[in-house]
Amino acid sequence: MKALAVSTTALAIGLASGAMAQDEGADCPVKVGVLHSLSGTMAISETTLKDTMEMLIEQQNEAGGLLGCEIEAVVVDPASDWPTFAARARDLLTQDEVDVIFGAWTSASRKAVLPVLEELNGLMFYPVQYEGEESSKNVFYTGAAPNQQAIPAADYMMNELGVERFALLGTDYVYPRTTNRILEAYLKDNGIAEEDIFVNYTPFGHSDWSTIVSDVVAMGATGQQVGVISTINGDANVGFYTELAAQGVDAFDLPVIAFSVGEEELSGLDTSNLVGHLAAWNYFQSADTEINDEWVAQWKDRMGDDAVTNDPMEAHYIGFNMWVNAVEEAGTTDVDAVREAMWGQEFPNLTGGTAVMNTNHHLSKPVLIGEITEDGQFDILEQTEEVPGDAWTDFLPESEVLTSDWQELECGMYNTETETCVQIQSNY
């Protein structure tokens, strides 16, 4: 923090002197690619992240820029289409010549971009919770891995709510399917019978939830407590929660804990019937810290009094500031130099404590369980200390022997039994 303060003071002095002096050898402007869907089914979630990046970049420019240069945001719209994500990422790296990319939401979009990043040695910060089972030298994962969201959520439902039968409901793509494989294995390890686990997938934008909700409600006929773990993504959440209310299902009868529903998604819903349902994230707007109060105030000043903050925004906030500090430390935007400078970077969480970037390219972050309140916010029920993100889960046999360490092992998929680095990563 002392180093940050010195750096900020130096930048402020430079700005007050009248202009940013370009560092010797710096290539101005520094270009930051913003790769988030502004149209299509994922725009409900991703547009806010584009706005977040623009605010962070403007704030950094007001503080003096980076390496004596102004930072320029290069915004593209991959339109919720996974091949378009890959095409726009290629354009950002080859035509726009950006120094870094902040973007993607779904794992399908991230996996579409990954081969492009590795081919062209680009660097991307990915801000959303995901299924793990991946560690690329070209990606820093600032959202939650399963052990920082899905596993604690399952523990909360079993230990605090007494849930004995689980419905795992997800959108049909890689993140829900892999996360639910992990959850199924974990639940069985904790005594939940296979017949007490119902798994269902629906396409993006799915709207007719009547049959599925009825089937889940029917699971309670045994008298056992039923709970839903939701990996439903995008605007399909609107139909899901609307159907719960239409069937008179409340959080006492059938608690739902979601991994992709935050303040932004709730802002478009009538939350009066959702009070008591849950979400697991690493951040909630309601976090009672001075730094979060300032962040929320800055966002509302920019976007309006009704604007809300959410977890992926905090992930971009942490990731961007870590990247800025790594670039300053490296003295260059060169990808390889910045990557090495990222290991061990620390930055304050908005919820308190400090995030740390580990050599597996995943953050150490706290886990929060929140309960939906009538105003569309969350009452924080539980908050842990910082938990290091696992690239590879301990709950799948093919993954429990794997580890990731880009500093010492120079490998994202190292087999601890054979002591070899596997070059091709799993892709479920």
Image: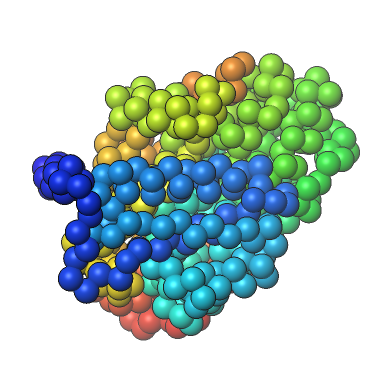
Quadrant housing the C terminus: bottom right
Q: Is residue 368 above or below residue 357?
A: above
For the image, the number of numbered tags is: 0
Residue 344 visible in rendering: no
Residue occupying image coordinates x 40% and y 63%: 31
- Percent x, y of residue 246: 83, 23
Nearer to the camera, 183 or 70:
70
Q: Is residue 365 above or below residue 95?
A: above
Q: Is residue 215 above or below residue 103?
A: above
Residue 186 placement, left or right of 359: right
**Which scheme is used to colour this image of the protein?**
rainbow
Nearer to the camera, 188 or 199:
199
- Percent x, y of residue 36: 57, 55
- Percent x, y of residue 73: 45, 56
- Percent x, y of residue 60: 32, 47
Residue 104 placement, left or right of 33: right
Nearer to the camera, 87 or 171:
87
Residue 262 placement, left or right of 388: right
Nearer to the camera, 204 or 84:
84
Residue 375 visible in rendering: yes
Residue occupying image coordinates x 22% and y 74%: 25
- Indicate the quadrant where residue 333 lies: bottom left
Residue occupying image coordinates x 47% and y 51%: 127
Quadrant housing the N terminus: top left
Residue with the most extreme front position: 18
Residue occupying image coordinates x 72% and y 42%: 235
